[in-house]
Amino acid sequence: MSPIIIIFIILAYFGCLLWISWHTSKKATSEDFYAGNKQSLWYVVALGMVGTSLSGITFVSIPGTIGTAGFSYFQVVIGYFIGYFVVAYVLLPLYYRLNLTSIYSYLNKRFGINSYKSGASFFIISRVLGATLRLYLVINVLQYFVLEDIGFKFWHTAVIILAMILLYTLKGGVKTIVWTDTLQTIFMLTALIVCICYILSYLNLNITETFEKLESENLTLIFESDWLHKKYFLKQILGGAFVTITMTGLDQEMMQKNISVRTLKDSQKNMVSFSFILVFVNFMFLVLGGLLYLFAKSKNLVLPGDDLFPSIALQHLPPVVSLIFIIGLISALFPSADGAITALTSSFCIDILGIRNEGRYSEKEQSKIRMKVHLSFAVVFLLFVFFFKALGDKSVIDVLLDIAGYTYGPLLGLFSFGILTNRSVKDKFVPLICIIAPIFSYLLYLLFKHFKIEYQFGLEMLIINGTLTFLGLLLVSNPHKSNNINDDQSF
């Protein structure tokens, strides 16, 4: 494909995002940036969240797991589905009742300032690592398969992409992200459908015949019955549910969009609709992975995991399909970072700097600080993308879930203790507990590895980490009801 065409596509796509940004950020205030002034349409948020949740991880990495893991990832997806209902009917009512802009301010109301800062800090660490890992994956694919041939270096691509993201998120924040993510979701799903339809046609198969062929290759297994295995079905389903509760329900980026919807009822409709759509779309990406495996086998191609989809799409499919893949890839790229940078800016400004505290800063001063923080996070993202580039080629989906197990555990422990108990805590000890719990979790993993114990830790590491945090909080708590705002209607 002509390099000129590729560059034109990228510029045209970016032009669409800039137009949306210009249109949505006119007369934008801090309230628009942080919460969309609570005027977002629930069905627009639902569709946009699909693209954010999928991003480059699903678009590139999930199809590449079929050759080694079959359809076992769908166990995690079932867990996701369960978790979304917990978010919709346990966490969202709490956030709306307290009228939160940052969800971590709940911890301040419930426990105290140290708990509040600890929760926000672990979100920042978690989201920086997760978002930059997603961003790295797609930039790396775009660079290796598309831009390298026209003279771009990896760092050129990374800098340009982050500069583009800054330009369309700097002013509008959530109010812009809600709409840009929706556009990007549509393009990503279009690429998915087109690629599935073309490969089915090329192989002269229907869906039933596809599964028959995959079954003959022993690749249709969903449920792993060996309880010692990392992918044992109860570990995966339960772990997937808790991944959703933490990475969606306790994540400022995801909740920032949800609480930008006008009413709790509409936000719940958004979450439930989104959960059904996401299950279906994830399954279709697994189907695509199966088709790509069969396509590669028909041509005697040996392709490693994350390279499977881009290699076939760009080197073995017709130009028009390759073109659609590039559009889908770009659509997977931007949601990997735009909402994350916006949410990180919001959390750092509100939770760490406290710029929304009444009377502390004028609107103009808030805007200046917010832009400086926004730019700073872009630089941090760039540095971490370079870091992941230097690390190597381990499957990105595995790395992402491993990170979640350690960094989101303290958030799970903090929120569950606050919601499930009436106990007060000695707030000054909370940061220490939140640091010790992940360390102990990792030491447990190393202990099993050192003694060559057959049991393999999977997604349950998140639950173990959260439980250790919960127990630590229990040790520094007392039974006297204090600051329990779970049922307080005054906020």
Image (cartoon, grey):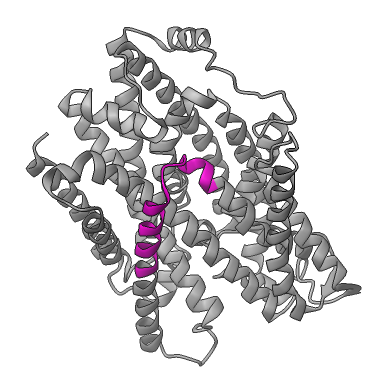
Q: Quadrant of the N terminus?
A: top left
Image location of residue 381, percent across then percent down: 38, 63
Q: Quadrant of residue 233?
A: top right
**Would you say residue 491 is visible in this rendering?**
no
Q: Position of residue 411 (x, y in %)?
A: 66, 61
Residue 84 visible, this angle? yes
Image height of 65 relative to 89, above or below: above
Q: Is residue 424 left or right of residue 298?
A: right
Magenta span covers which residues? 379-400
Percent x, y of residue 241: 66, 43
Q: Give the residue displayed 56% in from the left and 52% down from the top.
A: 403
Q: Quadrant of residue 410?
A: bottom right
Image vertical order of residue 485 relative to residue 264, above or below: below
Check the image and report above or below for 437 versus 110.
above
Report the front residue among 351 and 102. 351
Percent across and percent down for residue 330 are 28, 45
Residue at 18% from the left image edge and 48% from the top image edge: 10
Q: Quadrant of the C terminus?
A: bottom right
Q: Is residue 391 magenta?
A: yes
Q: Is residue 18 magenta?
A: no
Nearer to us in this view, 267 or 217: 217
